[in-house]
Image: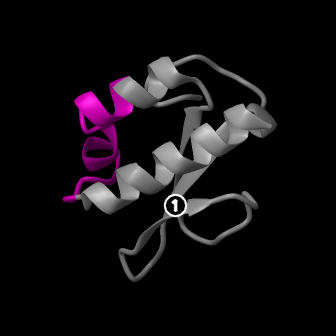
Amino acid sequence: MCIACRQMKDKRELLRIVKNKDNEISVDLTGKKNGRGAYICKELECLAKLKKQKLLNKTFKCAINDDIYAEVEEAILEYRQN
């Protein structure tokens, strides 16, 4: 389920962001990294909502660096170009 639009989608249609046991946040392009995952659609509307409402902060219950939001944006934009 996308944390921005709350729609159920196939896992391959979503981008995974993961928080590992060391509380490090990263974009998981493989979908196989260990840790707690959050998913977002690869849509620009969902990206805008993710950034505006700081949804990763709420999902992972910690402060998320703006670099992570930039990394998510970069991954989505790269996907949209292909």
The magenta stretch spans residue 55: yes
Q: Residue at x 36, y 33 (%)?
A: 50
Q: Is residue 68 above or below residue 59?
A: below
User: Residue 15, located in which quarter of the rendered image?
Assistant: top right
Q: Is residue 34 above or below residue 61?
A: below
Tell me residue 27's x, y (percent): 55, 59
Q: Colour scheme in the image? A: one colour
**Towards the viewer: 60 or 76:** 76
User: Which residue bears the numbered disc 1?
Assistant: 18
From the image, give the main secondary structure of the stretch colored magenta.
helix
User: Residue 28, located in which quarter of the rendered image?
Assistant: bottom right
Q: Is residue 12 above or below residue 4?
A: below
Relative placement, left or right, of 34 versus 73 is: right
Q: Is residue 39 above or below residue 63?
A: above
- Which amino acid lies under the numbered mark 1 shown in the image of this protein? Val
Q: Exactly how many numbered labels are in the figure? A: 1
The magenta stretch spans residue 62: yes
Relative placement, left or right, of 64 versus 49 is: left
Q: Magenta span covers which residues?
A: 49-63
Residue at the extreme bottom: 22
Q: Element under label 1?
A: strand
Residue at the extreme left: 63
Relative placement, left or right, of 19 versus 75 is: left
Relative placement, left or right, of 6 versus 65 is: right
Q: Residue at x 27, y 55 (%)?
A: 66
User: Residue 59, located in which quarter of the rendered image?
Assistant: top left
> Quadrant of the image for the N terminus?
top right
Q: Residue at x 39, y 52 (%)?
A: 70
**Towards the viewer: 38 or 69:** 69
Tell me residue 77's x, y (percent): 59, 38
Q: Residue at x 76, y 61 (%)?
A: 30
**Towards the viewer: 21 or 54:** 54
